[in-house]
């Protein structure tokens, strides 16, 4: 017997990396098992419109595009930025969130005041992300410290093992809210847009996703979810 909102159409599997609050994270009382977040809530709307039950498959961020291109998951919702090399390996939905990388530093430090100051420093990033890419391109003697979880980068920053963390703005805010000694620089480091990825050529899933994104933007659902997860 099916449970949840899917009644007859079986399951649809969302691939994600649930270390990215407020988009996807683990909690005792999640909306799908232990998982919660804006992406999970959007995926639930997609599943509902398809008449299917949503399942969440949690994995390393760097495994997500592979998982969707081999059919292990039906789509990826992971605060994932559209960028050229990903478009070679997956198709992307309409964008649903304007985002970007920001710089987290320790309060009171004076070495890093703007983007230019990142060069030649020790910078923590989340492996395989656009933040990793942007920092890796700095060159010079910049040292890139790659972590599977953004939170682990933040812990090393707290312990003075690295000079800064470059990560997406919303998770950065969530991390800083939990670590009093940290702050985010005002100047954004990159400007990006999130979208949902499907297997190349899977137009049926892609069209269903775009249809739901359009619906939730028009009927107020997206605004409600935004208030719940982003403006909370
Ligand atoms: N937006 C970033 C990227 O797409 C990070 C996403 C994430 O860590 N979940 O690479």
Image (spheres, grey):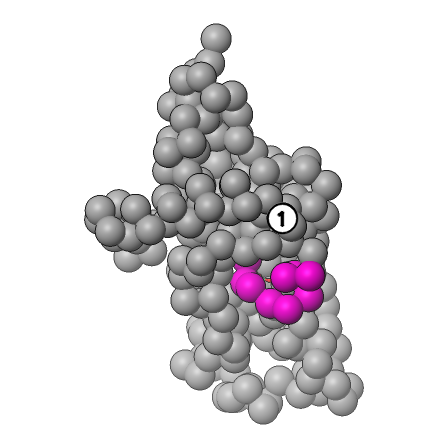
Nearer to us in this view, 149 or 87: 87
- Reply above or below: 74 against 152: above
- Reply above or below: 1 against 203: above
Left or right: 203 as drawn, with respect to 85: left
- Reply above or below: 26 against 84: above
Residue 78 on the magenta span: yes
Nearer to us in this view, 216 or 114: 216
Can you give x and y, in whole percent of width and height, for residue 56 in the image? 54, 34
**Which residue was labeled with disc 1?**
201
The residue located at (22%, 46%) in the rendering is 219
Left or right: 171 as drawn, with respect to 161: left
The residue located at (33%, 51%) in the rendering is 214
Q: Which residues are magenta?
A: 76-88
Estimate how packed mark 1 is, as few (under 14), some (14 to 19) or many (20 or more) residues with alpha carbons within 10 Å.
few
The residue located at (40%, 58%) in the rendering is 96
Q: Is residue 172 visible?
A: no
Residue 64 on the magenta span: no
Identity of the residue furthest to the top in this view:
1
User: Looking at mark 1, is its residue's CB closer than 8 Å to ligand 1?
Assistant: no
Left or right: 211 as drawn, with respect to 87: left
SS for dot 1: loop
């Amino acid at each position: 017997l099916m449970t949840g909102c899917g009644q007859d159409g079986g399951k649809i599997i969302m691939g994600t990396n649930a270390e990215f609050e407020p988009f996807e994270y683990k909690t005792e009382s999640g909306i799908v098992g232990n998982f919660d977040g804006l992406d999970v809530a959007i995926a639930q709307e997609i599943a509902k419109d398809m008449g299917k039950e949503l399942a969440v498959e949690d994995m390393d961020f760097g495994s997500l595009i592979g998982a969707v291109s081999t059919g292990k998951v039906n789509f990826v919702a992971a605060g994932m930025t559209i960028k050229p090399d990903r478009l070679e390996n997956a198709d992307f939905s309409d964008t649903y969130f304007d985002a970007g990388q920001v710089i987290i530093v320790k309060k009171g430090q004076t070495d890093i005041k703007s983007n230019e100051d990142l060069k030649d420093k020790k910078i923590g990033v989340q492996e395989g992300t656009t933040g990793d890419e942007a920092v890796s391109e700095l060159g010079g003697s910049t040292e890139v410290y790659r972590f599977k979880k953004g939170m682990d980068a933040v812990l090393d920053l707290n312990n003075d093992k690295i000079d800064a963390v470059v990560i997406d703005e919303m998770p950065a805010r969530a991390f800083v809210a939990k670590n009093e000694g940290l702050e985010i620089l005002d100047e954004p480091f990159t400007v990006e847009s999130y979208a949902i990825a499907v297997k190349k050529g899977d137009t049926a899933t892609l069209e269903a996703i775009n249809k739901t994104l359009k619906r939730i933007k028009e009927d107020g659902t997206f605004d409600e979810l935004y208030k719940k997860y982003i403006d909370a």
